[in-house]
Image (tube, rainbow, N blue to C red):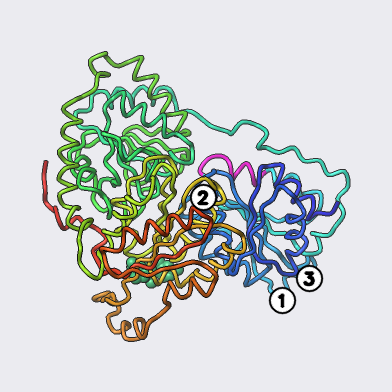
Amino acid sequence: MNVAEAISKAVVAEGARLAAGITGQSVGHIADALSMNPDMSMIYVRQERVAVDICDGYARVTGNPGIVFTDAGPAATNLLGGWVNSWGDSTPVLFFAGHNNRYSSPRRQTKEIPLADVFGPVSKWVAMINDPSQVANVIRRAYVKLRSGRPGPVVIGVPYDVTSMPIENFHYEPVSSRPRIRSGGDPAAVQAAIDMLGNARNPYVYVGAGVLGSKASADLVELAELLTLPVATTLNGKSAFPENHALSLGIGGFSRALYSSLQATITAANADVVLTVGAGFKQHATTAALPKGTRHIQVDVDADELHKEQIADVGICGDASVVLRQLIDAARARLSKERLAPVKARIEELAGLRARWVEISDPLLHADTTPINPYRVTWELTQALNPDESIVLHDAGSVRGTTCQHYIATKPRSFLGFGVQSAMGWSIGAAIGAKKADPSKTVVSVIGEEAFAETAIDIETAIRSEVAVLLVVKNNRAIPATDAGISPHLAKTRFKGNGVVPHLVARALGAKSARVENPAELREALKTAVAEVKGGSFYVLEVVTGRAPGSLHAKWEGAKK
Ligand SMILES: Cc1ncc(C[n+]2csc(CCOP(=O)(O)OP(=O)(O)O)c2C)c(N)n1
Ligand SMILES: [Mg+2]
């Protein structure tokens, strides 16, 4: 056995089942050894960043990291556009980076880059395997970092000369054979938190993707029902709490986000106690401060994240599922029967706020204008899919807002939001990864025509790999973005000609496709598209849309309870 084969054996023992990348001399042995393993599903992409996007989408659904492999130098840097998404959103991905021979660098060798300097600041960990004796230890360390705490992408560089070195009697004991490392909260802090929540007049719960990563949705529902707590999610955490639940506020913020719903915004604005769990407090999610005097209980698996946005009154470091369970137990032990009874008035109040949100949204969702309103596309998609059996993704740009606010996610990981880095084109690869993760689901990416143009070439990858997903392209090119105040003069260059025409490009790459301009034909077109994808075809539905504001706050700004 050589080092490359030992690496393949070790990652498979750790549970790796998906690898994606592009080969090159430096990584050739590793790519081949991964391919030799019958348990590994291989995807050969057309650009490296899509390999990361595939593994990123796969990990968001399974929690299991996929393996990315690339040649050295520009091949490795070519994946950074995807890599920073995984880093920003704390998604576990394991990257085997081809590298120059050990003793030939650093001498400006062909494709030589300072791997640790380039990836170090945007990775959870960067390590090198410089000797066969290091294989087992480095891979075990990598999996500890990928599977515990706040996850993130990990790089292992392997010099080409090392990959073919013999490794005798290779024995690997996977860390994944042990239970996941999960820590609980300080019991005193848990008690303080439950007393604070129990006494709250207007509680507000705000949760992020940490709840999804910890598979804590059932615990969250139980706690919310026990104490009648309204729950909002971050964009990345969307689907952590069922959005068809009477206590759901949809997307919210701390205290306000670009995409927070009316019900989330008003609930947060009136909150006296806020419980946050596994939320990242990113710029778009923190557009208004908490009201003065509001107390904050913050739960995060990463102690470095505590007191991040503002001082927390109670900070609890621990795994979301473990801490939520502790909170449930503490509530049962410490709170009165009366407090644990359903608070009917709160549920009615939420229903009233939700009705106002529907009233504001309905004209957009049902608009019959031409070009088609992009919110209408989201509404029709919600009708065309069974949300319990689907995974919906969005891409960067205005499609994010016109998709994430009204799609109703009912099951954990049935909607994959992404956001702090927001690299255009992510959702094509991520949709491929999501479908690999759960082939029983209908997977749909909603994407703009410019984001489509960034990564559409990998439609060919999906078709060659027999992965069928639906891309709904909201094409608003006919109405150029004005980007007023930023780059209005660029429009004559940016919007010249027809641009990349999604339904034609899709067809050239081997996909089925259609284009819709008439709102009356949208429902039928979506029905056909969904049926085709369920039948195993990759399908691109291009919908000619207008432009609409991504955030709806202006429609009810200043509104009070
Ligand atoms: C890789 C990358 N490059 C540039 C940007 C900046 N950017 C954000 S949205 C956008 C335009 C997106 O256009 P489109 O995909 O058509 O979506 P729309 O906003 O029209 O809905 C650009 C250039 C980005 N987010 N990611
Ligand atoms: Mg566009």
Residue 110 is marked as 1
Q: CA distance from mark 2 to mark 3?
A: 34 Å
In the image, what residue occupies the spot 66% across and 44% down? 141
Q: Earlier in the sequence, mark 2 or mark 1?
A: 2
Work out whether residue 126 can be spotted. Answer: no
| Among the 4 quarters of the image, the one containing residue 205 | top left
Image position of 304 (left or right of 309): right
Q: Which residue is mark 2?
A: 91
Q: Which residue is mark 3?
A: 104
Q: Position of residue 461 (x, y in %)?
A: 59, 65
Q: Nearer the viewer, mark 2 or mark 3?
A: 2
Magenta-span inclusion, residue 228: no
Amino acid residing under circle 2: Thr
Nearer to the camera, 351 or 181: 351
Image position of 377 (left or right of 558): right
In the image, what residue occupies the spot 75% across and 64% down? 28
Label 1: element kind: loop
Mark 3 and ligand 1: say if the CB distance to the nearest ligand atom is below 8 Å: no
Amino acid residing under circle 1: Thr
Our reading of the magenta stretch's main secondary structure is: helix
